[in-house]
Image: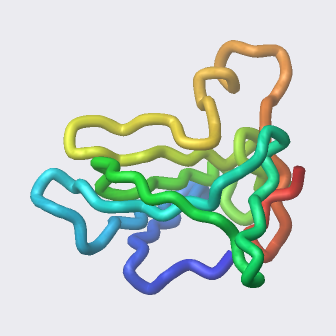
Amino acid sequence: MLIPPHVLKAVLADGSIIAINPYIGGDIECGRIFTDKITDADGNWIPDGNGGYETKETYLKQCGIMIIDANGLKGPNQLGADTYSFIITNNKISNWHTKIESVLTDEELNYINYDAAGDFIN
């Protein structure tokens, strides 16, 4: 996964990794416009007929994201299995893509596979 140069990274003594990607260019309350691809009922991106995809803009108050890889470079490197992501707002940190509480309470892991290029696999 290519990490942009403005991402703050730390490797802890136990090998776990924490990365924080601060969003740049928002307003005083971390508000900014995000452009997302529109999906159909099955979650597939909808083609726009010009080689791209239909998009929508949404105003959200998000200061950045934080990703924690609990065991560093060791596998499986899967969201929800050993890697967790969080949205940072101006007043809290929330789960994003993963539910870290489920790792602490559930019998089975709920994770999303991804490949080395950083793309998610369904």
Point out the residue furthest to the front here.
49
Taking the spot 45% from the left edge, 70% from the top edge, the residue there is 9
Give the camera-side residue of 44 and 26.
44
The spot of residue 54 in percent (x, y) is 64, 65
Residue beneath the point at 51% across and 65% down: 11
Displayed quadrant of residue 102: top right
Residue 75 visible in image: no
Count every numbered label the image shows and give the total: 0
Residue 107 x, y percent position in the rendering: 82, 15
Locate residue 25 relative to residue 120 in the image: left or right: left
In the rendered structure, the answer to whether residue 97 lies left or right of residue 108 reads left
Is residue 105 in view from this perspective? yes
The structure residue drawn at horizontal position 71% and vertical position 40%, both measured from the top left corner, is 80
Q: Would residue 92 be found to the left or right of residue 35 on screen?
A: left
Residue 7: percent from left, percent from top: 42, 74
Asked if 70 appears above or below 108 in the picture, the reply is below
Q: Nearer the viewer, residue 25 or 107?
A: 25
Quadrant of image for the N terminus: bottom right
Could you tell me residue 16's position as x and y percent? 59, 55
Name the residue at 66% across, 49% down.
Answer: 83
Looking at the rendering, which quadrant does residue 25 occupy? bottom left
